[in-house]
Amino acid sequence: MRHTTFHLGGDKGIVTPENLDEALQQAIEIEIATIPTYLYTYYSIIREPDQNQIINYVKGKLSNVGLPEQELDAIVLDISAKIMVYANKAGALIMSVVIEEMLHMALSSNVKQSVCSLPDLVDKSPEVWPAFLPGHDPDFPINLAKFTQDQLVTFLKIESPFKLRKGSDLLSNAIEYTTIGEFYGQIKKCLEEFEFKYQVEKPQLVPGKGYYAHENIDTVYYNKNHKTQFTNQDGANEADLVHVINRQSALEALDIIVEQGEGNEGDFEINKQVLNGLLTKIYDLINNHKESEGIKSTDVSDGSQLAGYMIQAIKNLAERNEGDLQGKLSVIKNLQKAVHAVNEPFESHFGKFLELYYLSDEIQRFQNSFKAKFNIPEFDLESFYVLNFPDNPKTSDYPAVIQKLSNLLNAIYSYIFIMTQECYKKDGNTQYEIFMFGIHKSMIFILNSLCGEISSLQFTDKEGKIRTVAPTFENYPFSAASSPKSQIISLYNEAVASFNNISYIEERIHDLPNISLEPYQETATKGSLFS
């Protein structure tokens, strides 16, 4: 198993010219670490729930209530629409974050390529789950898990602009930091204080090519009125790659990562109890003061705007150490000015996940009030929009025939990183072809298709429970005996023999660029912070 050793010396929280190369590699691996868990949760969401199934379920629950037919139809239609919009929006927001994490990986790789050395992207996904962000203080477990409030709490911790409460010991070989923004701040400080030679002749992923398009079919959702909505409205918070040629462009690249991911620092504990308590406080403040203080009800008509209110409230509570809950109206009024100044949702990753947490809480509160209102003991809509994925699965957990499909999926996933690293050895048309005909098609079409196919299957887990088969996003161990592409073709042939329904991707697989294992072999002794 490959392993990385950092030789830091002194304070492990300080980035210096001597360890800048290692710090940038750590930054790359932090970004890569988030990709499989965000993807896993994304593919657990049924983005287009069966509306008729929801309607029939709700009607069945209300069959003995005695509602007039017209009123009953209106209720079930409203509930089904609420769930369909929520599921589609949740998927769109999470996928938009995935794309930006891949952008962040490329931005940090551009800085490393220009200032230090070739970025190492191959075999860097966590090998064991739960995983831990390298160097984060405190550490906390990150799981491959389906879409739940608990998983959203983990996402909020990953992207948090707030210092989390101290926890257990860290991984021993990484530069320590308390927020990702703080870590990038250390790198920026090093670049600002010391002179470096920027190797502008080396290939980078450059802007203007459409490599990481923010708006695509997977990041668009529809509201209740069937109108198209974009996860980054009006282009807000969108960013492109940065060609790193000097100090200014290097700092610009790092600023994009921090601004899209989080925000300003604070000190706050993030868990379900705190978040739910905060929600209650926000609801009370809005309901008690919105009319008298000129806060219109439309100001908080959806989760995107309330997410902004919550962020400011968290900062305020953090500053006051969660004391003196009176007078918190100023919190809402201050953020109200900011929200209405730009008239758009708060669109950092932290803001998007906080919005989803609010929407999830809203669904839960609705279900509880619905049960109480109609005296229904059981009423749970989750199964209509979330697949029953297991936690932290491995290919070896699945029956042999399903392993064939899982191996192919993991090989495609791993090949995306091999192709991305190859882009740092090629430029011009060759690089463009690798990205657009390799990485882009692998991610948008082949990987997406395989994740859809594998999640249509079921298996019996070790506890005897029926589960939905899930993608595992493991590093695939390509052999040095032949090219990765030839091995992918062999894996496809094995899988299609048992799953003929994947035959439509054959041409796409044969069209993949043929990249050698050289990038992998050159870094095979370095390893990963997750090994």
Image (spheres, helix red, strand yellow):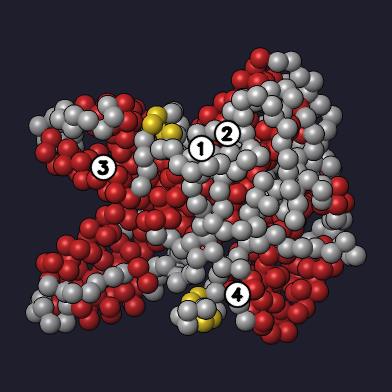
What residue lies at 70% left-to-right and 77% top-to-bottom?
A: 404
Q: With respect to residue 416, does 264 lie above or below? A: above
Drawn side of residue 509 relative to residue 283, left or right: right
Drawn side of residue 512 relative to residue 65, left or right: right
Disc with the residue nearer the chain's start (3 vs 4): 3
Determine the CA span between mark 2 and mark 1: 6 Å
Residue 63: image x %, image y %? Answer: 16, 82
Q: Nearer the viewer, residue 427 or 135?
A: 135
Pointer 4: what residue?
397
Quadrant for the N terminus in the image:
bottom right
Q: Nearer the viewer, residue 11 or 388?
A: 11
Determine the CA span between mark 3 and mark 1: 24 Å
What residue lies at 71% left-to-right and 70% top-to-bottom?
A: 408
Q: Mark 1: which secondary structure?
A: loop
Instruction: Give residue 176's mark.
Output: 2
Q: With respect to residue 103, does 374 lie above or below? A: below
Determine the CA span between mark 4 and mark 2: 34 Å
Q: Few, some or many C-alpha atoms within 10 Å of disc 4 (few <14, some 14-19, many ≥20)? A: some
Disc with the residue nearer the chain's start (3 vs 1): 1
Pointer 3: what residue?
278
Determine the CA span between mark 3 and mark 2: 29 Å
Residue 377: image x %, image y %? Answer: 18, 74
Whether residue 347 is visible here, answered yes or no, is: no
Quarter where residue 405 is shown? bottom right
Determine the CA span between mark 3 and mark 4: 39 Å
Contact flag, marks 1 and 4 (Cβ < 8 Å): no
Given the image, on which type of amino acid does mark 1 rest?
Asp
Q: Mark 2: which secondary structure?
A: loop
Pointer 1: what residue?
137
Contact flag, marks 2 and 1 (Cβ < 8 Å): yes
Disc with the residue nearer the chain's start (2 vs 1): 1
Given the image, on which type of amino acid does mark 3 rest?
Leu
